[in-house]
Amino acid sequence: MRYPPAIQKLVEELIRLPGIGPRSAERIVFHLLKSPPDETVRLAGALTELRKKIHHCSSCFNVAQSDPCPICADVRRDQHTLCVVERPTDVVAVERAGNYRGRYHVLMGKIAPLDGVGPEALRIRELIGRVKRGGIGEVIIATGSDVEGEATALYVAKTLKELPVRVTRIAHGIPMGSSLDFSDEVTISKAFQGRTPV
Amino acid sequence: MRYPPAIQKLVEELIRLPGIGPRSAERIVFHLLKSPPDETVRLAGALTELRKKIHHCSSCFNVAQSDPCPICADVRRDQHTLCVVERPTDVVAVERAGNYRGRYHVLMGKIAPLDGVGPEALRIRELIGRVKRGGIGEVIIATGSDVEGEATALYVAKTLKELPVRVTRIAHGIPMGSSLDFSDEVTISKAFQGRTPV
């Protein structure tokens, strides 16, 4: 004997999601059965809306409900600077920091040969297109500092080399509020290499 | 800047679920945005069906799509024995073991004064009603072996004491496939207390 079909079906759909195993799926189902029916209705509604409303901006490929996205459409933002990131979550992180006023280009991933993700799977061709169309003075590469992020940064920098644009990489070093004690060797080396005059 | 409203809304609904924090909610949303739209449609559908189709059996209080539930409706099952468990998940566990042929009574929780759950919040009154209606020869108490499960077992046993029914508790001892080495002191004491002649 298993659960009634309606529970079984929902458990099967939930375990497809990242980070949810059979146990957590069961917990979620019984949580929903205990909660006011509204909660389940709202969750189902939010899921339906997601795929209907969310698209990728045809210019920067960030997730958005409008095209171009609010950032690309904002004429007050610096149109000469592009920040290249891996994912939409990175855009939110940079915006939260609050002092970058340029635009973005979301690659939608990073080069990861082991996972079968080559450069052609990313939005690199579209980045070159944007730079070629002109008006861009600087491309700031802000991919991650892990191996794949570094490889992607190198690849993007190489691809843009022939074009009349300044290509920069965000600094890597000791995080603010931290001490040398808590930093690994690679980070400390990077911090020394990237030292600036005071 | 935050995510577009449709993403924000779904994240807010997801973090209400047990075991899902803001990070895992984001991961789920971006997983869904990457997957075929079908996956989201099926998940939303399964959620909607859940609350429409799943009810509690009016006899044993297990979750079911029919009333009485398939186990209560099954005339081949022993009608004289009731197994008292805390939750619908326990019914599935006992059914998986496969040799219990009686019926169930799901208390829908356990007595937990610290969480404000008293006996009146459980389906104990309904259990007494079922026993009083007659035809029940044995009530097997299979609540958990944690403090609340034990307290619930004691309370149920005391409540049934005046009624003409045999009340038993499932055995506690060394789990099968395990050794004394790996068992805690309370389990070992219980195993000695519950020894049977060979």
Image (cartoon, coloured by chain):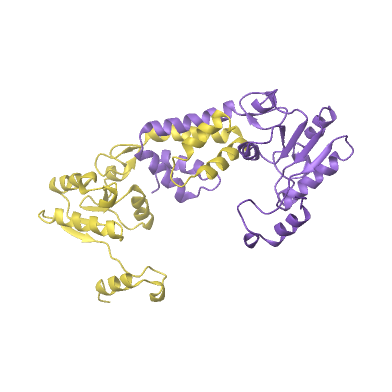
Chain colours: A yellow, B purple
| Residue A54, quarter of picture | top left
Seen at 42% across and 34% down, the residue is B40
Seen at 16% across and 45% down, the residue is A129
Give the left or right position of residue A154, taking residue B57 as reference: left
Seen at 88% across and 35% down, the residue is B163
The spot of residue A14 in percent (x, y) is: 48, 38
- Figure check: A25 above or below B183: above
The spot of residue B55 in percent (x, y) is: 64, 28
The spot of residue B13 in percent (x, y) is: 51, 41
The spot of residue B182 in percent (x, y) is: 62, 60
Observer-nearest residue: B30 or A127? B30
Observer-nearest residue: B139 or A186? B139
Give the left or right position of residue B26, taking residue B127 as reference: left
- Figure check: B139 above or below A138: above
| Residue B36, quarter of picture | top left
Residue closest to the far right: B162
